[in-house]
Amino acid sequence: MFFRKLNNSDLWNKIKILREYIKELVPAFKERTCWSCGKSLNIYDFLSDNLEFSPEQILELWQNPILEFHCCECFKYLKRDELSNVDLQNTNRYCKNCHKLMNIYQFAKSYNYLKINELKDIWLKENSVIFCSGFCEKYYYRIKKRKK
Ligand SMILES: [Zn+2]
Ligand SMILES: [Zn+2]
């Protein structure tokens, strides 16, 4: 569960591949709008927000008739609502690396690629290892590896 940073050329390659797929697919290619606010959505934004997926997977998700999509803003509010329950609020967790006290919102922000249920599971599990940032996570595992 690492935060993977891809460089721009990887993203560019993925965009090119996706563009070819879409060309073949038209007119079956879906026009998507945000399920909450109706703003029209762009598949390339969706790709760049979800770089852990391949272009094939992105297209499959996009075309899936049972999935509803949200724009970034609506998604943020949606997540905020779901994170505001009391169980999650009353837990204090510390970054395993720098020992900073964290709240659930900071955690959700650092791990924004996780789904709500995954966030909750990790946050509420007493002995799960969490980090305040991708930097702390990388640093912690690098040091740990060295000690072995
Ligand atoms: Zn929206
Ligand atoms: Zn930290």
Image: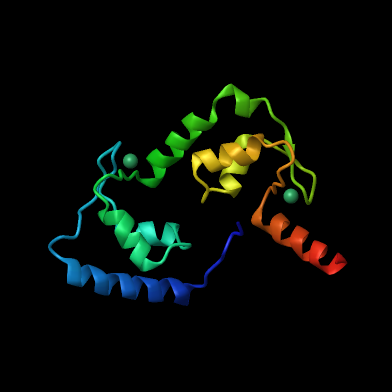
Residue 80's spot in the image, x, y percent? 50, 33
- The quadrant of the image that shows the N terminus is bottom right
Q: Nearer the viewer, residue 1 or 36?
A: 1
User: Left of 2 or right of it: where is 22?
Assistant: left
Q: Quadrant of residue 21?
A: bottom left
Residue 139's spot in the image, x, y percent? 75, 61
Does any portion of residue 106 appear in the rendered image?
Answer: no
Count of all numbered marks drawn on residues in the image: 0
Does any portion of residue 51 appear in the rendered image?
Answer: yes
Q: Nearer the viewer, residue 50 or 121?
A: 121
The residue under the point 43% across, 71% down is 11
The relative height of residue 58 versus residue 64 in the rendered view (above or below) is below
The residue under the point 39% across, 76% down is 13
Residue 118's spot in the image, x, y percent? 55, 43
User: Left of 80 or right of it: where is 22?
Assistant: left
The relative height of residue 90 versus residue 36 in the rendered view (above or below) is above
- The quadrant of the image that shows the C terminus is bottom right
